[in-house]
Amino acid sequence: MEILVCAKRVPDTSENEIQPNCSGTDIERDDLVYSVNEPDNYAVEEALQIVARTGGNVTVVTVGAEEDEEILRREMAMGAARGVLISDDAFQGSDGRGVAAILKAFVETGHYDLILTGVQAEDGCAQVGGMLAAMLDYPFASLVTSIEVLEARKLKIGREIEGGSKEINAIDLPCVLSIQTGINEPRYVGMRGIRQVASVPIPTLFASDLGVGADATGGAAAKVRRLDYFVPPAGKGAEMLTGSREEVVEKLMDLLKAKGGLN
Amino acid sequence: MARIFAYIVHKGGVADDTAAELPAAARKIDATAPPVAIVTGWGAGLDKVCENLRGTYREIWKIAKEPLAYPNAELVRKALVNVLPAGSILLAPHAHFGVDLSPGLSIKMNAAYVPDVVDIEGVEGAWLKAVRQEFGGQVSTHIRCDLSTGAVLNIRPGAFRPSTGAPADGQVVDKSAEVGALAARRRYLETIAAETGDVDITRQPVLVSIGRGIGDQENVALAEDLAEALGAAVSCSRPVVDAKWMDKSRQVGSSGQTVRPRVYLACGISGSFQHLAGIKGSPLIVAINKNPKAPIFRVADVGIADDILEFLPALAARVREETCVPGKRGAGHD
């Protein structure tokens, strides 16, 4: 099976505190630690496990800039056969639909049986996979937590729905699936693994290579645009307990006694 | 202004809570024209939902088709594309079905798509101004969305307060005939119910709930020790389950369990809306997180900015002093 995984390099929220910059035009990007979007890692792992059973190859693609190459290399160190960077100044300001249009053009340059994305990225949009599927006229499923290859052109998949229940579907290939975290345990990648793929060439494709133009991508074509970043309103806000740890523990004990927290 | 429609999620003949919230979002787009409810399904359950929506919506479009007996997003999308007028604005809840349906639907409608909308600030010309959150709620953004070819807006459940007003005395309009034949390349097979674990966290009066901040599997024992001292149980947020440190049955949230404790100790939990959606019954929420800017402090009643790995043992020791339950404390002096 030929599998394409769409990945993205994002600020790592477990390493960074995210806040708007002083003018609100962007988040504060000084000193941010970046990594591969966590759900995308699960998608790559799932792709690798499928090709280990069925044969085939895993390709990882990202739409971004030169520095995004590092996540492609990381996923290649996990075992992906090929990494592809799609980068062009003309793509600046693309909305989700624009990114999906770029990926559609790339998909049409190859023959992929299965396309995976992470369930969502740092913006919480969870949109590109579903849009890409609709543009390609492929079937789609989101929040996928299990994949079983039934026969050559069919998968049995589980989706996460409410209350911890799982919805089981059969889906025809080719299709697009968005992968939920927890579907597997992504393998560890050490420095040695990264070094082994350090010299593998990663091709960069431009808008002209893919035949996508300003009518479908970039800021001019975008129907949706982010205007600014700001600090969310505090709401009622928590009453912060302050003082030494011992004092805070005492205050909390009083509250727990009053609210039935001590059984 | 384009017509506004509200997609109604329902199950077992009962409409989801969001059915009452979407009109509040619609009013912020156009206060003069109430939205039309769209309900797809099959059988008596569908009729019951439509009947009950007559109190909330003035007009309800019913789409009754046997293949829609289970809400398969691919089939629902086809039905909606056939029924919705060009340029429509469709509101849907941003939950597991909306995430499945809406991105692809926006492409097939050639409409704009804005996911997970938490507020709407109005419309100027063809532009809608909405509010979203990024990075798990750490920052908010204003979004401008072009309505000129229609829009699909996924609305965060719970973000808009249900409107109270005079009963709408709505009319049910059967649109089934406009849908045409429905076939999909993804077929629903079955639903597997959540596994029940060793402890039923939905029945616990006090929960010590841990998140990513617990850091490592061996630290889970710190929460278990505090829970033992308190006579409580340990629950958790999604990253702890993803890391296989706790069982799925312990997960609180929209994709886990819904809990109704008296006291909820959120330890090292950032506070994503999916997690908070699983906490009901207005418990005392105490958040303990070393990041004083963690989103959880915006919704908690009481906040403590401290490292849970040090705070939890200190609290457990103090609780044991109070309740005289012998614990796992040090051997003391000799």
Image: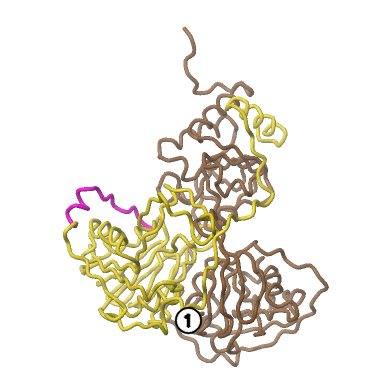
Residue B169: percent from left, percent from top: 80, 79
Q: How is the image coloured?
A: by chain
Under circle 1, the secondary element is helix
Residue B78: percent from left, percent from top: 51, 85
Task: Determine if the magenta segment contains residue B134.
Answer: no
Would residue A83 appear left or right of A95 to someone viewing this image? left
Residue pictured at 35% horizontal, 64% vertical? A7
Residue B66: percent from left, percent from top: 55, 83
Q: Which residue is mark 1?
A: B107
Instruction: Write down the region rendered in magenta.
Output: A183-197
Residue pictured at 45% horizontal, 47% vertical? B240
Question: Is A15 situated above or below A142?
Answer: above
Question: Is A75 situated above or below B69?
Answer: above
Task: Determine if the magenta segment contains residue A187.
Answer: yes
Would residue A41 appear left or right of B305 to someone viewing this image? left
Q: Main secondary structure of the magenta part?
A: loop
Give the letter of the yellow chain: A
Residue B80: percent from left, percent from top: 56, 84
Q: Nearer the viewer, residue A148 or A228?
A: A228
- In the picture, residue B45 is in which quadrant? bottom right
Q: Nearer the viewer, residue B235 or B103?
A: B103
Residue pictured at 66% horizontal, 47% vertical? A237
Q: Is residue B277 visible?
A: yes
The single residue placed furthest to the top in the displayed view is B334
Amino acid type, callout 1: Ile
Q: Is residue B187 visible?
A: no
Question: Is A127 situated above or below A39?
Answer: below
Residue pictured at 64% horizontal, 45% vertical? B300
- Quarter of the image with the N terminus of chain B in it: bottom right
Q: Colour of chain B?
A: brown
Question: Is B275 situated above or below B205?
Answer: below
User: Which chain is disc 1 placed on?
Assistant: B
